[in-house]
Amino acid sequence: MVIEGVELRTAPPTDRDVLALTTAQQAELAAMYGEDQPLVALHPDITFTLLALDGTPVGCVGLQPVAPGLGEIKRMYVAPSARGWGLSRLLLEAVENHARSIGLTNLRLETGTQQVEAIVLYTNHGYRPTPPYPPFENEVVSLCFAKQL
């Protein structure tokens, strides 16, 4: 899929645009699920793909290696003003390509029960429900998915 004006670049978790987008994502999740939801810390070797539309950063997704061959998708987010154009599909494809390029063969992710659009996106792209993994095994609002690349 090609969308005019889209730029993708790799960024560390300390990148100011990544920080702004992940902060917005966490605020949106807090409003959706309540302030008491724990924030899972990011591992230092996570790498983000940042998506800009006409030069403005509007989306991101992180890839965290977990074990040999296994990676975890973290903090996938598209700003509300940029939703509905297929940008989340572009981010998902980009993170899967990045995972393959570094030798990962399996991906996993966690999303919330109220994030219907995310659930549909992941299942439409071959992610299947999987038992919750730490630290989500006791979170009633968490759903976990996995995909073999």
Image (cartoon, grey):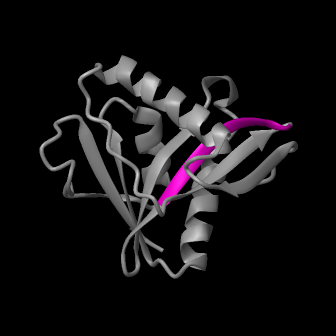
Identify the magenta region.
55-63
Q: Residue at x 40, y 43 (%)?
A: 119
- Residue 75: image x %, image y %? 47, 44
Q: Is residue 41 left or right of residue 94?
A: left
Residue 78 in view (yes/no): no
Instruction: Tell me if residue 116 comes above or below residue 67 in the rendering.
Output: above
Residue 62 shown in magenta: yes
Task: Determine whether, in the image, residue 30 is placed left or right of residue 81.
Answer: left
Q: x%, y% of residue 20?
A: 60, 32
Question: How many discs mark residues in the rendered view?
Answer: 0
Q: Tell me if residue 6 can be seen.
A: yes
* Image quadrant where residue 111 sits: top left
Residue 30, position as x, y percentages in the image: 36, 22
Q: In this view, does 107 lie above or below 92?
A: below
> Does residue 117 show up magenta in the picture?
no
Q: Which of 73 and 84 is in front in this view?
A: 73
Give 131 or 26, whichever is nearer the viewer.
26
- Quarter occupied by the N terminus: bottom right
Q: Residue at x 52, y 53 (%)?
A: 62
Question: What residue sits 29% from the left and 20% below the top?
Answer: 35
At 45% from the left and 23% from the top, the residue drawn is 28
Q: Which of 41 and 147 is in front in this view?
A: 41
Q: Residue furthest left?
A: 138
Q: Is the magenta stretch mostly helix, strand or loop?
A: strand
| Of the pair 71 and 88, the residue shown nearer to us | 71
Percent coordinates x, y for residue 91 in the rendering: 62, 51
